[in-house]
Amino acid sequence: MPSALYAMARELITEQVSHKLIFDRDAFIASRKPQLQMALRARSELDLHADDDVMFVGHAAFKEYFADPEEGYFVKSPKSFLGASGLRPEFVGFFEDIVTAMMQTIKHRAEVSAGDTLTQTVIGRPVNFQGLNSEQSNRQALSILETAARRSGFKDIEFQYEPIAAGLSFERQLTEDKTVLVVDIGGGTSDCAMVRMGPDHIQKADRAADFLAHTGERVGGNDLDIRLATESLMPLFGMNAALKSGKPMPTKTFIDAVSTNDVSALTRFSSLETGLYLEQLQRDCAEPELIGRLLRLRKNKQNQQLVRHAEEAKISLSDAEITSVNLEFVEKSLSTDINRAELADAIERPLEKIIALMKEAKDQAGVSPDLIFVTGGSAKSPVITNAVENVFGEVPLFDGDHFGSVVSGLTEWAQRIYR
């Protein structure tokens, strides 16, 4: 299930959370009174009835957003924002509501499947939610996650590092003891752990001594998608176009347009000031029709959709040397081809950060890995696996269930601690 949420109006997220709260509902409603009043106003303005679906999670969120990007509120990979520095209390509260809404949905689906009420959970967490002020960032993000879990009805809540969870899943395959470098490339973060694994370790009640090192940073699949959108798609919207003055085209606004994991960038791109700036830029550009496309993209709020197409191109290039990106949602007959070499060039900088995390984990542990296990959605790309092999040479490289390894390991950890 993709980590995405769409609501007909932003305040309706808070409203939906309040309807499903398990405990402390009165206190929550009191703390969210302005938002709930705005939700009532939104229902009236949108002519929504009490039984209308107003919030969607996962694939349904993308479907609703693509059908009507100009309206509603869409968020992808909210975990990327949870550790952001300098958040005002109202933003922290709103992120709590987004995460609670998603947890409530997941918990309900799991309970329907299990035929039972669930009160215990293990939540995967990156090593660091943010690179800057990591300790403060981690405390903030974990507090948001724990608050959301309790509001969803979980009583026992534990956290486990995602690369360690992925390693626990992989360990079942080992027939002899190995020192394994686990690399988990998630949507918003990448994490590495150096772990002793194998038959002599798997049954230990306390694995603390087996975890030799762990590193992590807020760089992941979303960053790769954004870089690919910037380098391969934004030129269609005027980036790199010539100005009539002969000066180079400023790139900041083009980067803001696709920086879908950066609240500040999205706010700047949506501002009135940026709209006026782009209108002037269109007059100054030697190819004004390209800036016109960007203005339409901005007006129709299709920048998330553009990055989604970059993500789909990245996925396609895992199996093909070249792929075509259809952008007719912006303009009839608009499309472009992207090849694997262009992908490699576009993601070079974030990929360097991921490789640096791997090297740091090796240095922290003071030993070299016997093998490397790579997981996470983006880990399927040959561009990434080739980069890893180029750095670590002859060390055998394995990949697993790109989307299920972490969850499988978290499940195994839950079985151990909740017996």
Image (cartoon, helix red, strand yellow):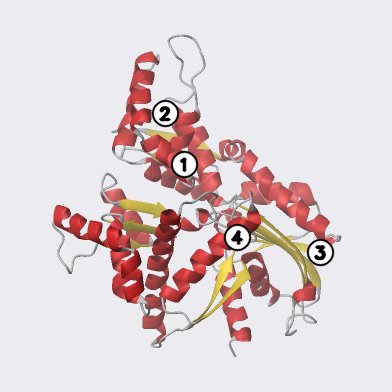
Q: Is residue 63 left or right of residue 241?
A: left
Q: Secondary structure at mark 2?
A: helix
For mark 2, what is the residue?
236
Amino acid at pointer 1: Ser
Depth-wise, is mark 4 or mark 2 nearer the camera? 4
Determine crowd level at label 2: few under 14, some 14-19, many 20+ residues with C-alpha closer than 10 A: some
Q: Earlier in the sequence, mark 4 or mark 3?
A: 4
Which residue is situated farthest in the right direction here?
Answer: 366
SS at mark 3?
loop
Check residue 370 in the rendering and tell me which mark sits there, or answer none. 3
Between residue 193 and residue 144, name the one nearer to us: 144
- Front-most of residues 276 and 231: 276
In the rendering, at what x and y percent does residue 12 appear? 28, 60
Residue type (three-letter) at the residue carrying disc 2: Leu
Along the viewing direction, whichever of 385 and 274 lies nearer the viewer: 274
Q: Indicate which disc, 3 or 2, sits on the residue closer to the N terminus.
A: 2
